Amino acid sequence: MKIYAIIPARGGSKGVPGKNVKLLNGKPLIAWTIEAAKAVPEISKVIVNTDDEEIAEVSKKYGAEIFMRPKELAEDLTLDLPVFRHHLETLKSKNDLPDMIVDLRATAPLRNSARIREGIELLSRAGKAKADSVRAVAKAAKHPYKMWKLNVGFLNPLYSEEESGFKDSWDAPRQSFPLVYQNNGCMNAFWPETILEKKTMTGKKILGYTMEDWESVNIDTSIDFLLAEELMKKHSAEFTK
C-alpha cells in the first residue's frame, strides 16, 4: 500500500508570527512532525503543503518534499477540504495518487512515529468498506454541558436541559456527564476517495483514535510553546521511538 503524509502549513500565522519555523526545543516546530513521519516505514513520501517560501526551505532541510499551494488556498478562513482536494487532484493528474493519506499538523509536535503507525494500522485493518477515515482525539478539556452562549449580556446554556438531560448542568459534577472528545490535530488518515468522491475530510464512517492529554497540545500561542517544551522534556523517551 502506498501511503503519503501531507503536512499542511501555511504562512501568515497571527497568534505567533512565523509559528511553523519557530524553534521548539532546538528545532523548528515543523521539523518534529517531518521527522516523526519520516520514521514511519509505511509512509513512502512526506510532503509539506505550504504557500510560504521560508517554511518550504526549512522543511526541505529536514527531508520533506514541497508542494506549493496557490495563495487563494492560504487565506485565514480557508478550509482544509479545498486544500487537500487541490493537492490530491494534482497528484492524480501526475499518476501519483497514493492509496492512503495521513494528515499531520505541524502544530501537534508531541505525537511520535509510533502513534502515527497505530492510526495507519487502524484504518488499514478496517478497510474502505468499514471506514472512511481515522481521526485522533483526546478527552475534551472542558465539557460542553458547562458552556454558555452570551446573548445581549445574559448567559444562556449551550445545551438546554432537554438536550443534556441535566437540570442546571453547569453546576453538576463533570464526572456524571458522558465522556466527550475533541480533535487533537495529531493525526488523521483517510482514503483519497473520501476527499475526491465523497467531498469531505472524514466521510461518515470515522474511526476514533484516542490519545493522551499530554500528547494533544496544539501550538496556537506563545504559552503553548512553553507548555510543549516542558512536556517534551518530561516525556523525552517517547521521542526516541
Image (cartoon, grey):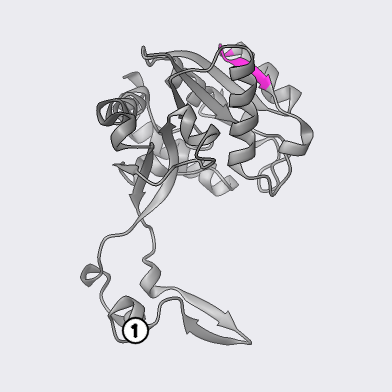
Q: Quadrant of residue 232?
A: top left
- Which residue does the numbered mark 1 point to in the structure image? 161
The residue depicted at 48 percent of the width and 28 percent of the height is 192
Across and down, in percent, residue 208 comes to 31, 44
Q: Is residue 48 left or right of residue 236?
A: right
Q: Amino acid at mark 1?
A: Glu
Q: Quadrant of residue 163?
A: bottom left
Q: Quadrant of the C terminus?
A: top left
Which is nearer the eye, 3 or 231? 3
Q: Quadrant of residue 78?
A: top right
The reply to whether the magenta stretch includes residue 241 is: no
Q: Is residue 11 left or right of residue 41?
A: right
The residue depicted at 44 percent of the width and 20 percent of the height is 37
- Residue 18 against residue 163 in the figure, above or below: above
Residue 22 seen in the figure = no
Across and down, in percent, residue 97 comes to 53, 17
Which is nearer the eye, 115 or 241? 115
Q: Magenta stretch?
A: 62-67
Across and down, in percent, residue 106 comes to 54, 32
- Residue 99 against residue 165 in the figure, above or below: above
Tell me the element at label 1: helix
Residue 7 seen in the figure = yes
The reply to whether the magenta stretch includes residue 65 is: yes
The residue depicted at 71 percent of the width and 40 percent of the height is 17
Across and down, in percent, residue 114 comes to 31, 24
